[in-house]
Amino acid sequence: MAGDVITAEPPQLFDRLEEQKSDSLLQLIALCDADPRPDKIDVGVGVYRDAAGATPILRAVKAAEKRLWETQETKAYLGSMGDARFTALIRPIVFGDTLAKDDRIVGLQTPGGCGALRLGADLVARANPRARIHVGQPTWPNHGPLIECSGVEMVSYPYYDAAQRIILFDRMMDALGRAEAGDLLLLHGCCHNPTGADLSLDQWREVAALVSRRGLIPYVDLAYQGLGNGLEADAAGTRLVVEAAEQALIAQSCDKNFGVYRERTGNLFVKAGSKRAAEVVFGNLLTLARTMWSMPPDHGAAIARIVLDTPELRADWNAELKEMCARIRTLRARLAGYDERLAYIDGQNGMFSILPLREEQVLALRREKGIYLANSGRFNVVGLSDDNVDRFAAAVVEKLDG
Ligand SMILES: Cc1ncc(COP(=O)(O)O)c(C=O)c1O
C-alpha cells in the first residue's frame, strides 16, 4: 500500500559473489613495478620486447594507421562478421593457398584469439552440449576458463615434462587413442605457451593420422604464427590436421604477429563436413557473436587489412616479423649456449619457455637478483635485452639443480 514503510533490508545481490583470486601474472607485474632495483629483469609479461626492452608499434602498423585516418570516411556498423576483407586476407596466411579455397571452411573476425576461443567453445556447446575437449598439460592458463565457461567438459592429456624438458609424445598419443569419436582436441599451432615445446612435423603427421582414424575434431589455437620459424613453417602442423580432419576449429590471433595486442584482433575459422554445413555454422557463429560482443572492434582488423592489401606495407610487415622472429631465435641460442642444462631452449619456439626450477629457486631469483618470472618457471625469452641476457643466464645457472 502507498505510504507503507519498508523495513526489510533489500537483498544484497552482490554479497553472494565469491571473492576472486587476482591473476598471478598481474601480481608479478605489480611486484616487479614496485622493485626499486634499477637492474631488475622482467621476464614475466608475455609481450614482445626489442633489444632496448620496448614493445614498439610496428612501422607497417603505424603507416597503416595513418592511411586509415586519412581515408576512413565512416565508422558505421560493419556487422557481426566484422571486416570480411580482413578475414579473407588472413585465410591463406593460415591455411596456404590450396586449403584456403576449401568451401567447407568459414571464418569471421573476433576480438583477438580469446574471442575466437570463446566463440568456438560456444559453438561446440550449442552443437553438442555433451562435447568434451582434450587439453594438453600444461597449457595457457586462460584456456580452461575460456572453454569451461561455455560448458564444454575438459579432459587432460599429458603434454610436457618440465623437469625432463621433453614432450611426452607417447603418453599424449596413448591418452588421445582413448578419445571418443567427436571429441575435440586442443592443439597449440606453434610457439606453445607456456612451454615453447612444439610438435615436430612428423609428430603432427601422427596426430593428423590419429584425428582422421578416430574422428576427432582438432581445435587449433594459432596465436603466434610467424614468431617461431616464419609464417609458413608455423602453420604447417595446423594445415596437416585441418586437412586430415573432417571438421576443425582454428582460433587465430593477429595480436602478437602485428603487435596490436590491445586492439583485440583475430579470427575464428571452422571447417564443417560440407559446404552446406559450413553455411549453417557461419549463421550460428553470427548469432552467437551477436550475444557476446555484437560486432568485433574494428581498428586492429582495419590496420591488418591495410597492411596486407598494400604491397609495400605487407613487405615491411614481413620484414619486421622476420626481425622479431630472428631476435627470439638469437636469444634462445644465446641462453642455450650458456650451459648444457639450458640447451633445450634453442630447440623450442616462440616467446616462452619453462626453466626447470623449483618454486623456492624462482623466489630466490626474485629476492636476490630482482629477476621476475612466474612461479612455475615459465619466462618470456624475449623479455630479455642484450644488456641483461648474460646476467640472467648466470643467475639461473647458479640456481639449477645438478
Ligand atoms: C596460447 C594463447 N592463445 C591465445 C591467446 C590470446 O590472444 P589474444 O591476445 O589475441 O586474445 C594468447 C595470449 O596470450 C595465448 O598465449
Image (cartoon, rainbow, N blue to C red):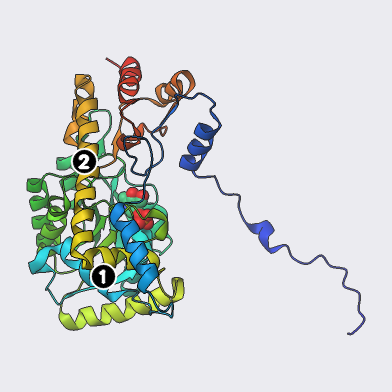
Point out the frontmost of discs 1 and 2.
1
**In the foreground, 80 or 184:** 80
Q: Which mark is residue 349?
A: 2
SS class of the residue under badge 1? helix
Instruction: Indicate the quadrant containing the N terminus: top left, top right, bottom left or bottom right.
Output: bottom right
Q: Residue at x 51, y 23 (%)?
A: 37
Within 8 Å of ligand 1, the CB of disc 1? no
Residue 221 vertical placement versus 373 (above, below): below
Q: Residue at x 60, y 52 (%)?
A: 18
User: What residue is pinned by disc 1?
Assistant: 87
Residue 255 vertical placement versus 137 (above, below): below
Q: Say left or right for 281 vs 236.
A: right
Please identify the quarter of the rendering in which residue 287 is found.
bottom left
What's under tag 1, amino acid-wise? Thr
Q: Earlier in the sequence, mark 1 or mark 2?
A: 1
Crowd band around label 2 with a 10 angstrom C-alpha radius: few (<14), some (14–19), many (20+): many
